[in-house]
Image (spheres, rainbow, N blue to C red):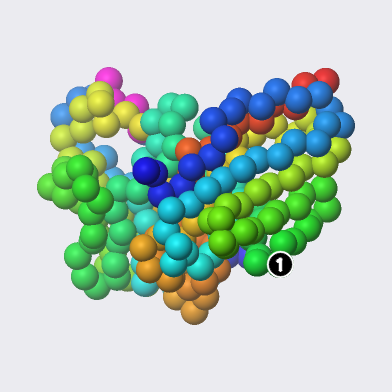
Amino acid sequence: GAVVSQHPSRVICKSGTSVKIECRSLDFQATTMFWYRQFPKQSLMLMATSNEGSKATYEQGVEKDKFLINHASLTLSTLTVTSAHPEDSSFYICSARDRTALDQPQHFGDGTRLSIL
Amino acid sequence: RKEVEQDPGPFNVPEGATVAFNCTYSNSASQSFFWYRQDCRKEPKLLMSVYSSGNEDGRFTAQLNRASQYISLLIRDSKLSDSATYLCVVNGRNYGQNFVFGPGTRLSVLP
């Protein structure tokens, strides 16, 4: 089945550090990838939609200058949390959809647990 | 009104019980519907798609009522391993675009 690899799975770093998270579709091409954030005991919230070869679309309230998204190829999207602070600590999950099967479910990465000290 | 709403939960049921989850969505143009399960501190995993005619997969039955914009999931003979949060997922603003997740309903199956 379709596989999405997300790396790293766990990050612990000091306040002010920038953290880069990678999301790769391993056996399919994805023109669109999605980045979600989930705080404890809350639902998944879409942060942004990553579009291959063009700018990402950010949801209302998400700072594009703080959460930099790059989708340079059909199999890789990256999310960089710039100058992270403790309030950015969360579970970040990416998902991707096979460009040849847009009506099918999204495939999720394993998630990245980010802890900012 | 939220795009996707679910029973607030949590549901605590004994093994072997039948449990039903309800979900409503606001976008009448939605085309695709799914149930995902999410274990604690893990990513969501697809449980089943939901089709207009209703569909069954073992102990799990999903129903869709487009007129009422309502989706349900029935779990029969619940197992301890069914304990998880169940997420109702509806495709978003346009067909083929982002999926919108409901807040989830937590299920605990007790021995």
Q: Tell me where the magenta segment starts and ends, as one range.
A: A112-117
| Residue B71 as seen in the image, left or right of residue A92 | right
Q: For the point 37% across and 56% down, which residue is it?
A: A34
Image location of residue B60, percent across then percent down: 77, 49
In-front residue for pair B87/B30: B30
- In the image, farthest residue toward the front: B67
Q: Is residue A94 magenta?
A: no
Mark 1 element type: loop
Q: For the point 43% across and 53% down, which residue is it?
A: B26
Q: Is residue A38 above or below residue A117?
A: below
Image location of residue A5, percent across then percent down: 48, 54
Image location of residue A59, percent across then percent down: 25, 51
Tell me the residue that label 1 is attached to. B53
Q: For the point 20% across and 43% down, which residue is it?
A: A61
Q: For the point 84% across and 28% down, which residue is it?
A: B15
Locate residue A69: give its quadrant: bottom left
- In the image, farthest residue toward the left: A65
